Image: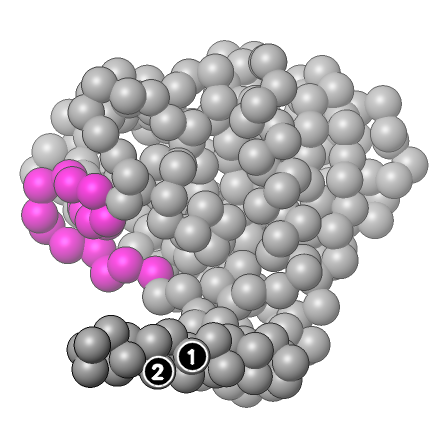
Amino acid sequence: MKRISQILVKLLILGILNIYLLANQVPLKDLITPVMTEEKPAPGKRVRQVGHEYKGTQVYHTLYLPTDWQKGKTYPVLVEYTGNKFPACGSTGEVMGANLGYGLSGGKGFIWVSMPYIQKGKKENTVTWWGDRQATIDYCKVNLPRICKEFGGDMENLFICGFSRGAIACSYIGLADDEIASFWKGMIAHDHFDGQNKWGYPESDRTSALKRLARLQGRPVLVCGNKNDYLKDHPKLGTFTFLPIPVSEIFDIPEGLVIHRHTDLWAHRHSPTRQIARGWLLDQVSVKK
C-alpha cells in the first residue's frame, strides 16, 4: 500500500511539472545531431561510408538509419547537401557537419544521407562550392540507389534538402540533368536558392537556373528562410510552399551552437515552424509520386 502511495505521489508531481512547463512555455530539449562514427550501420547510428569507386580516397558520405529502422522494411530518404565552410555562422562545409535532415526527421521514420561535393582530382570532399561538379552529380546517381537497395530506402520517396550552398545544390546539383532530377519526390531548401544571385561559378545566372528548375515538373518544394523570393514569379515551375524561419525568435542568439541566424539548426528546437515543416514533409510522403 505504501509503495502504491509513493507511485501516486510521483505521478502527481510529474503531472504538476508538465502543467508548469506548458504554462510557462519552457522549451523541450533540443535535438543533438549524432556524431559520425566508423561503425557498421545500425538504428540510431550515423556512419561514414565511401562509394566503391572512391576506395582509398578521402571522399565519403554519411548514412543515418532511423531509430525505428528494421531490416526488410522501406523508409523515405532525406538526401542532404551542406553549406559552404563559413565560420561566422558555424558551418564547417563538411559532410559530417550536416544537421538539417536530422532536425526535419527527428531521427525517426527517415533514412538520412549526407552527400559529398567532390574536389577536383577526386581525392577528397570540398568544403567550399562545387569542386568537380560532374563527379559530385555522378556520386549521387551511383550511390543513392545502392544505399536504398541495401538499407530499404524507398526510391519513390526521396527528398533532397540543403542549407545555404546546399539550398542552391538542391537545384544546381539535384536538377543538373534529367536522370538525377527524376530521383526526387520533392525538395527542402533553406536560406538561398539556385538563381537568386549570380555567383562566380558557371551557369549561376537566372536563365540557367530556370532551365534546371523546369525539371521539377511541378513537384513540391518547401522554400525556407531567405534569398529565394524570385520563385514567387514562377509558380508554374513547382508547387512552392514558402516558410519564413524566425531563427531569432526560436533562439536567443548567440545560444549554444547557434551563433548566427544563418543556420541549419533551426529544426533542432521545438517550434511551430518546425511542426509546419515536418507536417509538410509527411504530407508529401503520403502522396503518390
| Displayed quadrant of residue 256 | bottom left
From the top left corner, tell me how far across and down residue 47 is, in percent.
19, 47
Secondary structure state at the residue bearing disc 2: helix
Residue underneath mark 2: 9
Q: Is residue 288 left or right of residue 160?
A: right
Confirm whether residue 71 shows in the render. Answer: yes
129 within the magenta span: no
Residue underneath mark 1: 12
The amino acid type found where label 2 is placed reads: Val
- Neighbor class of circle 1 (other Cα within 10 Å; few <14, some 14-19, many 20+) is few
**Quarter that holds the C terminus:** top right
Q: Nearer the viewer, residue 233 or 222?
A: 222
What whole-number distance in Å separates the C-alpha atoms at marks 2 and 1? Answer: 5 Å
From the top left corner, tell me how far across and down residue 4 is, in percent.
24, 74
Q: How would you classify the magenta stretch by its main secondary structure?
A: loop
From the top left corner, tell me how far across and down residue 229 is, in percent.
83, 49
| Displayed quadrant of residue 178 | top right
Q: Which mark is residue 168?
A: none
- Neighbor class of circle 2 (other Cα within 10 Å; few <14, some 14-19, many 20+) is few
Confirm whether residue 194 shows in the render. Answer: no
Magenta residues span: 33-48
**Quarter that holds the N terminus:** bottom left
